[in-house]
């Protein structure tokens, strides 16, 4: 009889085995959500020159500094018009102004921009009714980005603002961590795939599709290997096909049943196994080891068990391989709304609905929690994490909940 491994130990084993992959270059249009592989360092200041923050007139502050009456405004000669995207040819001399648009470089000689609302002008004259403070309405060179600064650190998942920044720095390509390739394999003679002829005796392979999506969500690239029948030869052939990937996630065939050959086949393929059984529910049979350069997860066949164990073990591994620095879901504390009891031997993950009621965070289960009932997960926005040693919970007790997102 194998011993049960505690989940925290199992997670540590898995994370130790998962190393970040190499770097590849992708275009910024394809980089959303990818993990940055090198610090982004600004090659130059941005903005590259002092520029106007307003539509108005670039002036010498000495010419407009005093409060003017409407009747006696300061009057200056307009010597040039500078739209954004052009630089002034002239400098601003005493008694002169240059009409300037937002974003245009400051002309020489000027130290202040008077916003257009404070002026009245013709083509070649401007009257200034209100003063501005010295240096008003100028965005100084480098106020946003300074040459040599690290603007986005390695390991950051790229978001829209980051991609805008890369464009601003004129970097069309970006180094990112390679996508972990994850082979997804279903096992079981009872399974039919979605494109197989309908047979009401069979069970539709749903795991592969839920897992493939979970792989994507974790930042990996899924590769669907289909279904392996319950024979050592069939299993071995399919598993071998997955060994070109970084990770293999297999579901079913890891328990103690007569048709569960995963253990034998892993051994035949030379797997270096780290654990076989976890002290969690759902999902006690969970195998993990390395087959050559591939990390292999044997997850339980029941749909909820496979998703929950994927979430706790495969997801962190995929994220770490993909260059992420953080992989834990947000955890919140919430008031449990029900009664619950269990034996003090395993850690339980109940599927829960988090809600905010009168300012307090509450959580209740999604109803029946059978490990074959995928609705329990479909309705959930969190996993209620009940430690091994807890035996009973009463309404009002505080529990930890991993936030899965969805409608929360
Ligand atoms: P096993 O762990 O192989 O004993 O499988 C347990 C149960 O999980 C099976 O009886 C099936 O009902 C279900 N199951 C296994 N694999 C899948 C799958 N790929 N998709 C949906 N259900 C599955
Ligand atoms: Mg099976």
Image (cartoon, rainbow, N blue to C red):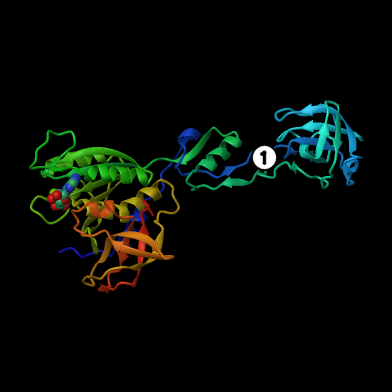
Label 1 sits on a secondary structure element that is loop
Quadrant of the snapshot with the C terminus: bottom left
| Horizontal side of residue 359 vs 134, given as left or right | left
Q: Position of residue 33 (x, y in %)?
A: 44, 42
Q: How crowded is the residue under tag 1: few (<14 C-alpha within 10 Å), some, or many (20+)? A: some
Q: Position of residue 235 (x, y in %)?
A: 16, 43
Quick check: 32 above or below 260? above
Determine which residue is flagged by label 1: 46
Quick check: 260 above or below 388? above
Quadrant of the snapshot with the N terminus: bottom left
Residue 265 visible, this angle: no
| Horizontal side of residue 365 vs 362, given as left or right | left
- Residue at image x 41%, y 40%? 178
| Horizontal side of residue 371 vs 118, given as left or right | left
Residue 71, picture quadrant? top right
- Residue at image x 90%, y 35%? 75
| Horizontal side of residue 252 vs 295, given as left or right | left
Q: Nearer the viewer, residue 69 or 47?
A: 69
């Amino acid at each position: 009889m194998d011993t049960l491994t505690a989940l925290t130990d199992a997670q540590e084993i898995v994370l130790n085995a998962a190393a970040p992959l190499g770097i590849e270059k992708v275009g910024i249009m394809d980089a959303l959500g990818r993990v940055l592989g090198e610090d982004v360092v600004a090659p130059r200041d941005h903005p590259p020159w002092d520029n106007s923050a307003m539509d108005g007139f670039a002036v010498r502050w000495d010419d407009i500094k005093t409060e003017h009456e409407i009747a006696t405004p300061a009057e200056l000669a307009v010597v040039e018009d500078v739209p954004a995207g052009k630089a002034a040819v002239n400098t601003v001399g005493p008694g002169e102004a240059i009409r300037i648009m937002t974003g245009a470089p400051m002309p020489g000689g000027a130290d202040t921009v008077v916003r257009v609302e404070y002026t009245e002008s013709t083509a070649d004259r401007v009257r200034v009714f209100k003063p501005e403070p010295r240096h008003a309405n100028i965005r100084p060179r480098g106020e946003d980005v300074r040459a040599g600064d690290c603007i986005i650190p390695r390991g950051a998942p790229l978001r829209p603002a980051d991609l805008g920044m890369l464009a601003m720095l004129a970097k069309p390509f970006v180094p990112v961590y390679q996508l972990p390739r994850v082979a997804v394999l279903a096992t079981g003679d009872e399974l039919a795939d979605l494109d197989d002829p309908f047979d009401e005796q069979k069970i539709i392979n749903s795991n592969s599709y839920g897992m493939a999506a979970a792989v994507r969500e974790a930042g990996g690239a899924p590769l669907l290997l289909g279904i392996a029948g319950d024979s050592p030869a069939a299993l071995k052939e399919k598993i071998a096909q997955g060994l070109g990937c970084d990770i293999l996630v297999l579901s079913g065939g890891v328990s103690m049943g007569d048709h569960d050959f995963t253990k034998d086949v892993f051994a035949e393929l030379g797997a270096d196994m780290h654990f076989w059984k976890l002290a969690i529910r759902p999902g006690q049979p969970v195998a993990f080891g390395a087959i050559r350069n591939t990390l292999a997860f044997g997850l339980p066949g029941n749909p909820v068990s496979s998703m929950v164990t994927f979430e706790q073990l495969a997801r962190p591994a995929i994220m770490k391989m993909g260059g992420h620095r953080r992989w834990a879901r947000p955890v919140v504390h919430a008031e449990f709304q029900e009664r619950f009891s269990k034996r003090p031997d395993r850690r339980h993950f109940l599927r829960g609905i988090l809600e905010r009621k009168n300012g307090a965070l509450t959580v209740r289960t999604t109803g029946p929690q059978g490990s074959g009932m995928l609705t329990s997960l479909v309705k959930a926005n969190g996993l209620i994490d009940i430690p091994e040693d807890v035996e009973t919970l009463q309404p009002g007790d505080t529990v930890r909940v991993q936030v899965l997102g969805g409608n929360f």
